[in-house]
Image (cartoon, rainbow, N blue to C red):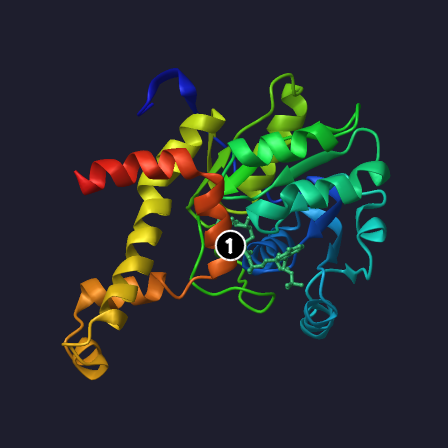
Amino acid sequence: SPCGPCHRAVQGRRAMTQIYDRVALIGLGLIASSMFWAMKRNGLAGHVTGYARSAETRDTARRIGLCDTVCDNITDAVANADLIVLAVPVGVMGDSAKDISPFLKPGATVTDVGSVKRRVIDDVGPHIPDGVHFVPAHPMAGTEHSGPEAGFDTLFDNRWCLVVPAPGTPDAATDRVIDFWHGLGSNVDVMEPDHHDLVCAVTSHCPHLIAYTMVGVADDLRRVTDSEVIKYSAAGFRDFTRIAASDPTMWRDVFLSNKYATLEILGRFTE
Ligand code: NAP
């Protein structure tokens, strides 16, 4: 293991059988839609419900067949669900958890896909009722595209998913979430939340911040024209522009929610 006791590699089988009877997706963007298509590809769920806050996203989901049932309210989406996946920006995970809390089935598991773990655990944890399990996770996979039409069934194939179970969670609930992510195509590691946030600050969060800023610098620089930037962009800047096309709301929440680890890495970068 690369970093000692805070990190546990989980060898897994590629599940091709149903793992949950009913799954509810809260938020229907890139990650949730990719999870749906991968669940369908591998038969991981009996029935998948979905909910997103805007009617436009729900209409798009219905049009493209994303979810077995798209619900117009969050209560219907989570009713009887065995697994509830919070797939909204990190800053609103707590609000979504509060909304669903009274309607969760005893024995159900709540998970999330947020890019920051300490903040999500602090915000969501207090809303998890007794008898419901909370197993946070973070798939280390994405693209610069967002929304319900951005997903595809191979997004998680051979990528890592970091599972960060809350203290006291029964092993059976954690193991089922791990099986689920293996079934979606991922490799899985179990990690402590603060370590997760530091690892992601260096591998993902700071690189995004630097890319956004570098594209901003090029935009701001009056002595080099836009056409020169485009014309002479080789791989370096071209990749920065792709990364900087990512959804600003999602990334604003990531930076604000992982402030200390991001600042630590930025400080080292500046030095
Ligand atoms: P996305 O494509 O932008 O979709 C976000 C979803 O959240 C949409 O359904 C949106 O609803 C909903 N939403 C946005 N703001 C909301 C609010 N204030 N209240 C309630 N719902 C709101 O995002 P995504 O890329 O799937 O990211 C979802 C989560 O996955 C985030 O926590 C992110 O940190 C994490 N993640 C992302 C990546 C990546 O590379 N994109 C990778 C790993 C993990 P409407 O469509 O109705 O606006």
Along the viewing direction, whichever of 110 and 40 lies nearer the viewer: 110
Q: Position of residue 11 (x, y in %)?
A: 46, 29
Q: Position of residue 236 (x, y in %)?
A: 19, 62
Figure check: 249 above or below 198: below
Mark 1 residue type: Met
Figure check: 169 above or below 98: above
Residue 217 lies left or right of residue 47; in this view the side is left
Q: Which of the four quarters of the rendered structure image does ligand 1 lie in? A: bottom right
Residue 158 lies left or right of residue 76; in this view the side is left
Which residue occupies the extreme bottom position in the image?
227
Q: Secondary structure at mark 1?
A: helix
Along the viewing direction, whichever of 148 and 210 lies nearer the viewer: 210
Residue 221 placement: quadrant = bottom left
Residue 226 lies left or right of residue 177; in this view the side is left
Residue 7 placement: quadrant = top left
Residue depicted at 77% across the width and 33% down the height = 108
Residue depicted at 69% across the width and 36% down the height = 110
Task: Give the quarter of the figure containing the N terminus.
Answer: top left
Note whether residue 99 is visible: yes
Q: Position of residue 41 (x, y in %)?
A: 60, 56
Figure check: 251 above or below 5: below
Residue 211 lies left or right of residue 97; in this view the side is left
Residue depicted at 30% across the width and 50% down the height = 207
Say few, some or many: other residues with alpha carbon within 10 Å of mark 1 (under 14 / 14 to 19 / 20 or more): some
Residue for badge 1: 250
Residue depicted at 71% across the width and 75% down the height = 63
| Mark 1 C-beta closer than 8 Å to ligand 1 | yes
Along the viewing direction, whichever of 206 and 78 lies nearer the viewer: 206
Numbered-mark total: 1
Figure check: 172 above or below 186: above
Along the viewing direction, whichever of 222 and 265 lies nearer the viewer: 222
Task: Give the quarter of the figure containing the C terminus.
Answer: top left
